[in-house]
Image (cartoon, helix red, strand yellow):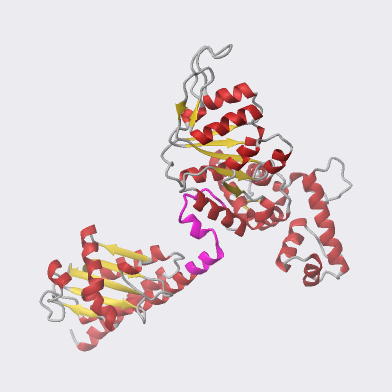
């Protein structure tokens, strides 16, 4: 083959590699991009195995001790990966990173540059090609051994360097995107510490809650959850349990409302046969059922005073008496209590024991209302939409932008539970209409088709609130000749939110 044809072949190989890397560049996540890129360069260079490691460019340190941000291996066993990672400190990889140059050798064990290094000698390294990624290095490409005859060639070195330059650009972009995403989502640091996949939202309010849960969950301490009905206290209690050392144990829920003192005591602590009329058999209580796990007491403020005293005694001693028993029993149970009542006021009103309040209030966590986490509403709408489709096997449907803006503008006194019911109804209504691919504001608020009016009969609190907001925004806009920026200043709102309200309420500029 002539020099010209060889050069042309190399140019084509580099061109094809670059094009294939460009095709991978549409990836939004770093791991899939690196995995496919590594597979590509291993195949192109004819390597038997490959390894690629990347560090965040903000740290500019590479290697196992640096805590790699992402690494990928191709054709490698666990033992191969361990051997390759030894090279970071004293082998071929260490030399490539220190010099910033690509290292190519037909046999590392025979190469005078490396043969005396322990990791090279111990692992009997043969053909190796190693290229640093980025300047200064933010990562490294390492390929070893051959599936084709002969060592890695000069053409392979050029391909590896082309690969390293291109990957550095794409990887830096993806890493920046990941950092910005992390900064935009204050919940991420705490999600990594918790089993929080089922927790929706990225607001500061939910981040504060998750921070509290991340502190409370690993410690075997009782927790008091406060917040209005519908905020998701049961889900938070479950998160505390699932993220604790008791996760393998039972999680037992009990609603303390609407039970008489005797029935509540029997439910909690059980009873012996003959303890009272109708007690024909022994009953195991919920405390025993939750042994080695968590007992979640919802609406704890509803417990009668006498039963409160028995609960306090159990919390202090971790022993209890079933009704009708003469001997106490032990139970290793963590208590998570929840209430939508102001317990301090209940203490002042003598409806809740002060000593029990202090015993439960060691680790209080306030679950925010939906009004406090309005930034999460759109995420909730999308989440409940997907869940409704899966639950009822409906055809795929999505919320429209108008529906999302309307949901964000509305008041939800029933919090997350009310929003979930509204979205479920909207998805079912919309999916029943042929050809509809999105649910709209009219599906979410079916009774709000007519213009909002405070004078309407049978108006609900939510309708009245929305009507007031619509009238206020419209009046303000009219007063400033529909100058949205000026209206935003008068309303003390972000201009983008005023636009959302205009769309949500269907307001029109009536000057024409």
Examine the structure image and report whether residue 190 is included in the region drawn in magenta: yes
The image position of residue 258, as x and y in percent, is: 66, 27
The image position of residue 131, as x and y in percent, is: 28, 77
The image position of residue 506, as x and y in percent, is: 78, 57
Does 58 sit above or below residue 351? below
Figure label count:
0
Extreme bottom residue here? 3
Relative to 172, is 62 on the left or the right? Answer: left
Q: Nearer the viewer, residue 227 or 388?
A: 227
Q: Is residue 88 among what the camera can see? A: yes
Relative to 34, is 256 on the left or the right? Answer: right
Does 26 sit above or below residue 276? below
Does 150 sit above or below residue 498? below
Quarter location, residue 102: bottom left
Q: Is residue 129 among what the camera can see? A: no
Q: Nearer the viewer, residue 71 or 238?
A: 238
Identity of the residue drawn at 55% across and 32% down:
313
The image position of residue 21, as x and y in percent, is: 37, 72
Q: Nearer the viewer, residue 3 or 115?
A: 115
Examine the structure image and report whether residue 117 is included in the region drawn in magenta: no
Relative to 277, is 55 on the left or the right? Answer: left
Identity of the residue drawn at 50% across and 16% down:
272
Does 466 sit above or below residue 61? above
Q: Which residues are magenta?
A: 178-200
Q: Nearer the viewer, residue 404 or 109?
A: 109
């Amino acid at each position: 083959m002539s020099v010209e044809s060889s050069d042309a072949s190399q140019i084509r190989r580099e061109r094809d590699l670059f094009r294939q890397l460009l095709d991978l560049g549409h990836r939004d996540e770093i791991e899939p991009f690196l995995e496919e890129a590594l597979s590509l360069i291993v195949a192109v260079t004819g390597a038997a195995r490959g390894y690629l490691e990347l560090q965040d460019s903000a740290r500019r340190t590479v290697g196992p001790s640096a805590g790699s941000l992402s690494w990928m291996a191709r054709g490698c066993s666990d033992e191969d990966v361990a051997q390759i990672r030894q090279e970071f400190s004293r082998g071929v990889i260490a030399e490539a990173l220190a010099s910033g140059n690509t290292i190519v050798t037909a046999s590392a064990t025979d190469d005078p540059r490396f043969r005396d290094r322990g990791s090279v000698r111990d692992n009997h390294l043969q053909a190796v090609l190693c290229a640093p990624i980025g300047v200064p290095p933010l990562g490294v490409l390492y390929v070893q051994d051959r599936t084709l005859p002969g060592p890695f060639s000069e053409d392979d070195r050029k391909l590896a360097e082309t690969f390293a330059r291109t990957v550095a650009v794409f990887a830096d972009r993806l890493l920046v995107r990941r950092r910005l995403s992390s900064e935009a989502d204050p919940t991420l640091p705490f999600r990594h510490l918790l089993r929080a996949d089922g927790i929706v939202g990225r607001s500061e309010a939910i981040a504060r809650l998750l921070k509290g849960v991340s502190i409370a969950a690993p410690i075997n301490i009782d927790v008091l959850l406060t917040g209005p009905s519908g905020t998701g206290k049961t889900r938070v209690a479950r998160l505390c349990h699932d993220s604790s050392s008791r996760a393998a144990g039972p999680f037992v829920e009990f609603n303390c409302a609407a039970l008489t003192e005797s029935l509540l005591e029997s439910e909690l602590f059980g009873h012996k046969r003959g303890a009272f009329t109708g007690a024909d058999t022994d009953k195991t209580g919920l405390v025993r059922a939750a042994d080695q796990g968590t007992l979640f007491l919802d609406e704890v403020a509803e417990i009668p005073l006498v039963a409160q005293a028995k609960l306090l005694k159990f919390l202090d001693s971790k022993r209890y008496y079933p009704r009708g028993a003469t001997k106490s029993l032990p139970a290793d149970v963590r208590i998570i209590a929840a209430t939508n009542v102001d317990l301090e006021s209940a203490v002042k009103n003598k409806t809740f024991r002060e000593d029990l309040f202090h015993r439960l209030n060691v680790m209080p966590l306030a679950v925010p209302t939906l009004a406090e986490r309005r930034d999460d509403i759109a995420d909730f709408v999308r989440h409940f939409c997907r869940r409704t489709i899966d639950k009822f096997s409906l055809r795929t449907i999505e919320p429209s932008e108008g529906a999302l803006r309307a949901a964000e503008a509305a008041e939800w006194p029933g919090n997350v539970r009310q929003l979930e019911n509204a979205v479920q109804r909207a998805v079912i209504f919309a999916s029943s209409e042929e050809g509809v691919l999105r649910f709209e504001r009219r599906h979410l608020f079916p009774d709000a088709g007519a213009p909002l009016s405070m004078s309407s009969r049978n108006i609900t609190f939510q309708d009245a609130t929305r009507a007031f907001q619509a009238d206020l925004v419209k009046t303000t806009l009219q007063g400033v000749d529909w100058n949205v920026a000026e209206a935003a200043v008068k309303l003390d709102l972000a201009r983008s939110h005023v636009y959302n309200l205009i769309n949500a309420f269907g307001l029109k500029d009536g000057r024409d």
